[in-house]
Image: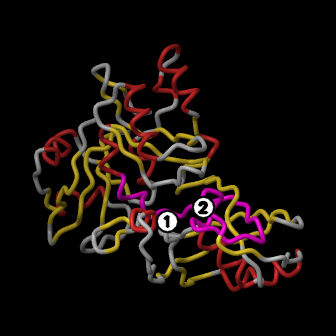
């Protein structure tokens, strides 16, 4: 487990079950306020109207945020049929209506078209920048926003429940996928309009709801119980990176930016290695550095103070 040090320095990951109506930045601010942590960041923005898994990095864990930003994500969401909205969710104004309601079989038949690598245009009300300005700022100012299509990947899309006016799905997808866009496009393929009425993220990489905590519970813990019980180790997001055991002397050398000759590490390698390969140098259970194999040396590219 990661350790809390100096009273207000926390190193590790905390998975927050983000509440409805709160933006990701505000969640980070609340976590910083409650824990009095010096350094806090989040891995992957979640819309204010969405709930669910929002990984929060503390201290040294912020250095590992890039390793989870591209992770697969899983969502549970509901599409309400018959109305198109400016924001593609319940927050926007109604701009089109349809009396068409797809059947369960029609929905199931349409799903395969949205599996694999697909093109989708992000919602006009999104954080994507256009000529240096956020798309949602331009849209709110009444400017017409042209959102260019981009490729995303849908690994799995299941219909969980179908009713007359709405249907609920579970989707696992790549970074950059907009659930609001998928709901909009699915409705159009079914000959109607639609928008997202419910959105919950259930998984980001290896983080899921089973290890999450609410902000209400976090507030209780900081006043009554050890926070460390909920803090996950910094290396949690680095499971896919090969670990390399180093000695105390080698660990100190890497921490000071030193390169270690690969010939001095021959006995440490248990599998093949390649130029540019990323490794995590470990002294016991402690993460020392993220390193790269460079020519004949092991080069530290990110050092940790744990």
Measuring 24% from the left and 58% from the top, which residue is drawn there? 291
Q: In front here: 192 or 298?
A: 192
Location of the C terminus by quadrant is top left
Q: Secondary structure at mark 2?
A: loop
Measuring 29% from the left and 50% from the top, which residue is drawn there? 281
x then y, percent, for residue 224 = 52, 13
Asked if the stretch drawn in magenta spans residue 97, the answer is no
**In this rendering, would 111 be left or right of 133?**
right
Label located before the other in sequence (2 or 1): 2
Q: In front here: 76 or 71?
A: 76
Q: Badges 2 and 1: C-beta atoms under 8 Å apart?
A: yes
Location of the N terminus by quadrant is top left
Question: Which residue is disc 2 drawn over?
Answer: 92
- In the picture, the disc for residue 190 is none
x then y, percent, for residue 296 = 14, 69
- In the picture, the disc for residue 125 is 1
């Amino acid at each position: 487990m990661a350790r809390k040090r100096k009273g207000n320095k926390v190193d590790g990951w905390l998975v927050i079950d983000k509440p409805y109506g709160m933006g990701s930045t505000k969640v980070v601010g609340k976590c910083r306020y409650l824990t009095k942590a010096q350094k806090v960041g989040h891995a992957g923005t979640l819309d204010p109207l969405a709930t669910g898994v929002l990984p929060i990095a503390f201290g040294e864990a912020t250095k590992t945020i890039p390793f989870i930003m591209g992770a697969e994500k899983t969502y549970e969401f509901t599409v309400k049929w018959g109305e198109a909205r400016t924001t593609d969710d319940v927050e926007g104004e109604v701009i089109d209506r349809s009396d068409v309601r797809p059947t369960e079989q029609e929905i199931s038949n349409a799903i395969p078209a949205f599996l694999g690598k697909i093109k989708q245009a992000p919602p006009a009300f999104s954080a994507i920048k256009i000529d240096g300005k956020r798309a949602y700022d331009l849209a709110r100012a009444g400017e017409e926003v042209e959102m260019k299509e981009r490729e995303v990947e849908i690994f799995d899309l299941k219909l969980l429940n179908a009713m007359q006016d709405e249907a609920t799905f579970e989707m696992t997808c790549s970074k950059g996928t907009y659930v609001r866009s998928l709901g909009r496009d699915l409705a159009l393929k079914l000959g109607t309009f639609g928008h997202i009425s419910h959105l919950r993220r259930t998984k980001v990489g290896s983080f899921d709801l089973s290890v999450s905590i609410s902000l209400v519970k976090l507030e209780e813990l900081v006043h009554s119980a050890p926070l460390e019980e909920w803090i996950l180790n910094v290396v949690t997001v680095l499971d896919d990176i090969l670990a390399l055991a180093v000695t105390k002397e080698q660990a100190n050398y890497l921490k000071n930016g030193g390169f270690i000759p690969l010939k001095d590490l021959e006995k440490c390698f248990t599998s093949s290695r390649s130029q540019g390969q990323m490794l995590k140098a470990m002294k016991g259970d402690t993460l020392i550095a993220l390193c790269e194999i460079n020519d004949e040396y092991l080069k530290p590219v990110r050092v940790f103070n744990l």
